[in-house]
Amino acid sequence: MRNDIFPNRVSLILIGTLSLLTLGTVSAEGTMLKTDDMVGVSFWLATAMMLASTVFFILERNNVAAKWKTSMTVAALVTGVAWYHYTYMREHWAASYAAGAGESPLVLRYIDWLITVPLQVSEFYLILAAVGVATAALFWRLLAASLIMLITGFLAESGQMADSLTWPLFIVGMLAWIYIMYEIWAGEAKEKVGQTSEGTQFAFKAMALILTVGWAIYPIGFVLGQGDGGTDGLNILYNIADVVNKTAFGLMVWYAATMDTKASAASEE
């Protein structure tokens, strides 16, 4: 019984800290959400979903085997970091919309992705590591590919580089994304996951599907954003993609951890 007290206290402290941060960010906001601002609504919904997911993952971390706790921590970090950034992206958009500009929080969004996307990619390694079939080389390959994808994507979309480099940079980013998909669906990760439990295999494949379909939204949004206008739809699309890719992805990690923990407990009885 005593062994459960400390983890529960830590979880409560973390949730309490999140609550204080939530009150602080809400009270600090000076721009009201307009009733006709559907993009602003999507920012609010994404913010709430990220916070709820973070609390859920922190609490559920206490209910899985020790080898899965790091994976659950990373899942909470992904949504927690996203929640924190979304509070500022939401305010940025609301202020810009009230001023009649409707400017996308591009830099804030890429800062968020630069932290959360490598964490998500590392989850594939962590899941395999939890069941003892991962290699460090796999982790570093996935991490490097995710950073290349993000850095080239930002340079292409932000206008920091010459216009002639926009599409070459976009193509490099796409190649990095395709490599990640290859590694997950046909490379070492695919080979290793075949050695795991049925629950882990299901969650791994579901996570791979989320990244394949969900991450495809970002390059589609980039292409659509190259034309005139379309800022509203692009931001709504990105917000929906972030919620699905981060929250649903974390739920699959939780599912794998829960199923493997139950299977291990059953085998010990």
Image (spheres, rainbow, N blue to C red):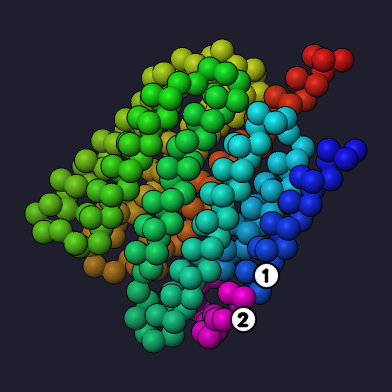
Callout 2: helix, strand or loop? helix
Q: Position of residue 119 (x, y in %)?
A: 48, 43
Q: Is residue 54 above or below residue 3?
A: below
Q: Earlier in the sequence, mark 1 or mark 2?
A: 1
Q: Amino acid at mark 2?
A: Ser
32 or 130, nearer to the observer: 130
Q: Amino acid at mark 1?
A: Leu
Residue 35 shown left or right of residue 241 in the figure: right
- State how far apart marks 1 and 2 are (Cα): 11 Å
Residue in the image at 66% along x and 63% along y:
18
Residue in the image at 76% along x and 56% along y:
12
Q: Position of residue 181 (x, y in %)?
A: 38, 30
Mark drawn on residue 20: 1
Please provide the residue range marked out in magenta: 24-42
Callout 1: helix, strand or loop? helix
Residue under circle 2? 27
Residue in the image at 19% along x and 47% along y:
169
Q: Quadrant of the N terminus?
A: top right
158 or 19, nearer to the observer: 19
73 or 1, nearer to the observer: 1
Mark drawn on residue 255: none
Residue 167 shown left or right of residue 128 in the figure: left
Does residue 36 belong to the magenta stretch?
A: yes
- On the question of residue 252 being in view, the answer is no
Q: In the picture, residue 35 is in which quadrant?
A: bottom right
Q: Nearer the viewer, mark 1 or mark 2?
A: 1
Residue in the image at 63% along x and 40% along y:
72
